[in-house]
Amino acid sequence: MTASTAKNNVKGVAMMVVSMAAFTLTDMFMKRASTVMPVGQILMILGAAGGMFFSIICSLKGLSVFSKDFFLRPVMMRNMAEIVGSICYVTALSKIDLSTASAILQATPLAVTFGAILFLKEKVLWHRWAAIIIGFIGVLIIIRPASAAFDYNALWAVAGMIFLSVRDLSTRAIPNTVSTFKIATYAMLSLFPAGFLFVILGIGGQSQPVDIYGASVLAGAIVTAIFGFWTITVAMRTGAVSFVAPFRYSRILFALAIGFVVFNEYPDIWTVFGAFLTIAAGLYAFSLENLDN
């Protein structure tokens, strides 16, 4: 490894960790927002603001947002998965601990691998199957469906994880000619009509006037989400993917810290153990992928 490569990897890791901190702050702000307004209203505002921002970025880069790319099957599938996944995950944030929701979300890379096996017909050896199974066992330990401690609201986080995995899997099928910023624009803009429909139908509660507190937490969610997207893009384009990607799991550390400091959360030993098992399985899967390459 050259000095330049090592420097880029360190920069990539730093940007990845910063992006995970930013996305955890986004979760925190959305959890706060959910106490004063319904999920549909949150997604409607977040989609409008985020879509506007990325549309401006596309315009500055000379990219046409409204093009036939939007109607590509993998793009439309990604947008639908983004909508459903976001609705489920934000609902989970409004009903269960931030640390628990984030711990369940750590299974997303394993779910993507599982989906690639099922739908993209990727061939894997038993080692990778073992990683997937152990990771999902970790999720079961976190939610403990057969115990008295089971909270069915945790299933919102599980559903969010599954649909966000479909989103990531769909991204693999999008042609490289479609800009990352166009993909982000489509995803954010898609949240607006979905959130608006929820508001109109009164799903999850009636929309509420946005006061100073509501505006501040929504602004926080928008800024941190945009910053998180930018830093994770820099991370993946700067360092080697196999070196940088495993640091996605730093998100759970930020979730545990913010959950404790901001929301007074005390995850039990089983939640911590389940999260550890899921992360360990994910890191093992990353190491296998690196060896394969």
Image (cartoon, grey):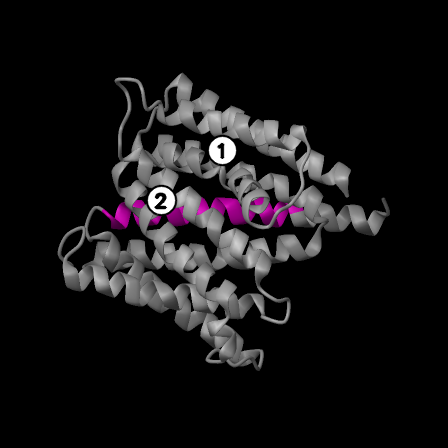
Left or right, residue 223 beside residue 241? left
Which one is in front, 180 or 125? Answer: 125
Which one is in front, 130 or 108? Answer: 130
Dot 1 lies on which element? helix
Q: Is residue 266 above or below residue 40?
A: above
Q: Is residue 250 above or below residue 165?
A: above
- The residue tagged 1 is 253
Based on the picture, tell me whether residue 82 belongs to the magenta stretch.
Answer: no
Q: What residue type is labelled 2?
A: Met
Q: In this view, does 270 lie above or below 179?
A: above
- Are dots 1 and 2 in contact, CB under 8 Å? no
Residue extent of the magenta highlight: 13-34
Q: Which amino acid does label 1 sit on?
A: Leu
Farthest-out residue, right: 2
Dot 2 lies on which element? helix
Q: Is the magenta stretch mostly helix, strand or loop?
A: helix
Residue drawn at (70%, 43%) of the image? 242
Which quarter of the rendered picture does the N terminus lie within? top right
Residue 60 place in picture, x, y as percent: 54, 79
Residue drawn at (55%, 40%) of the image? 114
- The residue tagged 2 is 28
Decide which of tag 1 and tag 2 comes sooner along the chain. Answer: 2
Residue 52 place in picture, x, y as percent: 40, 72
Residue 69 place in picture, x, y as percent: 52, 74
Residue 172 place in picture, x, y as percent: 59, 56
- Report whether residue 240 is seen: yes
